[in-house]
Structure formats: C-alpha cells, structure tokens
Amino acid sequence: MLPDLREKGGAPRWAAESPCHKIRGSARLAGVGLLIALLSALGCCSQAPGLSMAEGNTLVSVDYEIFGKVQRVFFRKYTQAEGKKLGLVGWVQNTDRGTVQGQLQGPISKVRSMQEWLEKRGSPKSHIDRANFNNEKVISKLDYSDFQIVK
C-alpha cells in the first residue's frame, strides 16, 4: 500500500519543502510503478493490492468467422497484413462455406482493433455481412510466432 503523502488540509507533504523533496517523492512513486510493472511482466503477481493492471496488456485468443463476400477479394491477404501491422499472431483461411475463419492472439487492445477491422472494413472489394467471434480466453503466452494464411 502506498504511504499517505498528504498533510492535514490535503496539501502534499513536500509542497512547503524544497524542490529536492519533490523530486525524491516523485522518484519514490515512479519506483513503485516500475516495480509493479516489472513484477507483472515476470508474472510474479497478477495484481498489486489497490492498483488495477492495464487491461490493454492482457493476452487473449479469439476465434473468428466472417460472412459475406469475403472470398476471391484478397480478404486473407489483407487480414494477414492488418494482423501483422497490429503485432498480432494467428491464422486465416477460406472455408468450404464461402466464409473466412481464423484465430487472433495478442494484447486485448490490439485484438479489439482487429475485431473491429474484421467486422467493418476487411479488404477493399469485400462486403462483410457479419462477423462471429467466439472462444475468447485469456492466455499466458502466444501459441503462434507469426500471422499465417492457411490454404
């Protein structure tokens, strides 16, 4: 738990002190933040008491299937390029049903961006009727090293 750095009346303790005290107080708080980030990166703790971890860093995996005019319009190629641009890993393939399906893995904020791209943009000549996303789960490590087109 962080120390209470306020005097009675709500002003910070170092407000009436020299600039050196301000720097030391800020450095102490920055050090706590760095420690929490380091421990989180190492997997030593899932969450520090009283502090919430940034949701955007959580790794997730999600399956998808895209319906509409999504074959013979370079949808897989554009999906691979967008996934790589966002730093995601996974795969994409055509199905016998005329859809495109695959799996995305990466930080949740980037996966959300890719889901929006799959649902609303796609390749320039595609026409997306709907996108289904399922089997979303938090993962501890990525299962893939790249974003592949499966033939």
Image (spheres, grey):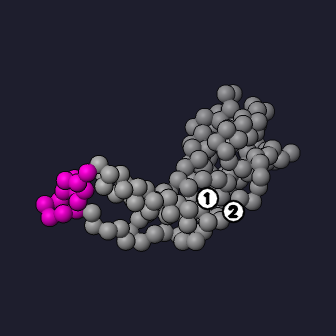
Please name whichever residue, 12 or 74, is drawn nearer the observer in this view of the structure.
12
Pointers 1 and 2 in contact (C-beta within 8 Å): yes
Q: Secondary structure at mark 2?
A: loop
Q: Quadrant of residue 66?
A: top right
| Crowding at mark 2 (Cα within 10 Å: few <14, some 14-19, many 20+) | few
Amino acid residing under circle 2: Lys
Q: Secondary structure at mark 1?
A: strand
Give the quarter of the figure containing the N terminus.
bottom left
Question: On the image, numbered disc 2 is attached to which residue?
Answer: 141
Q: Position of residue 73 (x, y in %)?
A: 75, 31
Amino acid residing under circle 1: Leu
The segment highlighted magenta reads 6-18
Q: Position of residue 134 (x, y in %)?
A: 62, 58
Q: Position of residue 96 (x, y in %)?
A: 81, 47
Residue lying at 65% horizontally and 65% vertically, measured from the top left = 140
Question: On the image, numbered disc 1 is attached to which residue?
Answer: 59
Q: Quadrant of residue 31?
A: bottom left
